[in-house]
Image (cartoon, helix red, strand yellow):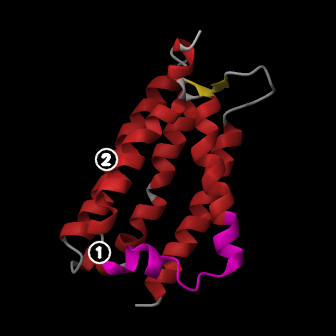
């Protein structure tokens, strides 16, 4: 039956991926692909990209946990995190010269705010479609590692001025 597979956590990533595709060109020049990826050390770039693949692909295997108490907390974290993430982009798109956007916290916010909605997804998808040993902190740990490298990458770009 196909219907249960539409209950996977990848669906939670669709609004984020769509947002990124639609608004990427609206971000300031430092966030554009050619500038953002220029001269990033391999020790940051490689683990960031490997971890990116894992954190975005793994939710395909994760089921929504409708009966678990973690769903409510996870959904709250996810919604709050997505709103904060979108806000961090809006600040960069519409107020790039503001003190916030020019600060280290504002510039790197699109990188580090992802941890909130990733944690939400981790709580929502606390089980897999397959019968293999899994506990949701595994996904969360991988997400934390990704966000560390992703934020380090953003910091390097910020440091270039």
81 over 160 or under it: above or below: above
Mark 2 secondary-structure assignment: helix
Q: Is residue 110 left or right of residue 47?
A: left
159 over 65 or under it: above or below: below
Q: Is residue 35 visible?
A: yes
Tell me the number on the disc at residue 101: 1
Point out residue 58 in the picture as x, y percentages from the top left corner: 64, 39
Which quadrant of the view contains residue 94? bottom left
**Which is nearer the eye, 53 or 79?**
53
Point out residue 28 in the picture as x, y percentages from the top left corner: 30, 76
Q: Residue furthest left?
A: 94
Residue 42, magenta (yes or no): yes
105 over 147 or under it: above or below: below
Point out residue 24 in the picture as x, y percentages from the top left corner: 34, 63
Q: Residue furthest bottom?
A: 161
* Disc 1 from disc 2: Cα separation: 17 Å
Mark 1 secondary-structure assignment: helix
Q: Is residue 67 visible?
A: no
Tell me the number on the disc at residue 83: 2
Residue 127, magenta (yes or no): no
**Which is nearer the eye, 74 or 111?**
111
Residue drawn at the location 56% of the way across and 20% of the way down: 5
Which quadrant of the view contains residue 158? bottom left
The range drawn in magenta is: 28-47
Quadrant of the snapshot with the C terminus? bottom left
Quadrant of the snapshot with the N terminus? top right
Residue drawn at the location 57% of the way across and 46% of the way down: 56
Q: Is residue 65 left or right of residue 84?
A: right
Residue drawn at the location 57% of the way across and 59% of the way down: 147
Tell me the number on the disc at residue 128: none
Point out residue 100 in the picture as x, y percentages from the top left corner: 28, 74
């Amino acid at each position: 039956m196909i219907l249960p597979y539409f209950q996977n956590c990848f669906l939670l990533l669709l609004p984020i991926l769509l947002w990124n595709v639609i608004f990427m060109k609206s971000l300031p020049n430092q966030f554009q692909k050619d500038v953002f990826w220029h001269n990033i050390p391999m020790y940051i770039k490689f683990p960031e990209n490997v971890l990116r693949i894992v954190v975005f692909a793994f939710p395909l295997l994760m089921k929504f946990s409708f009966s678990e108490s973690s769903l409510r907390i996870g959904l709250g974290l996810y919604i709050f995190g997505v709103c904060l993430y979108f806000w961090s982009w809006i600040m960069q798109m519409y107020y790039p010269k503001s003190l916030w956007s020019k600060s280290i916290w504002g510039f790197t916010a699109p990188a580090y705010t992802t941890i909130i909605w990733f944690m939400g997804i981790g709580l929502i998808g606390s089980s897999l479609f397959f019968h293999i040993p899994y506990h949701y902190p595994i996904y969360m740990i991988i997400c934390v590692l990704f966000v560390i490298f992703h934020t380090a990458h953003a910091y390097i770009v910020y440091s270039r001025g």
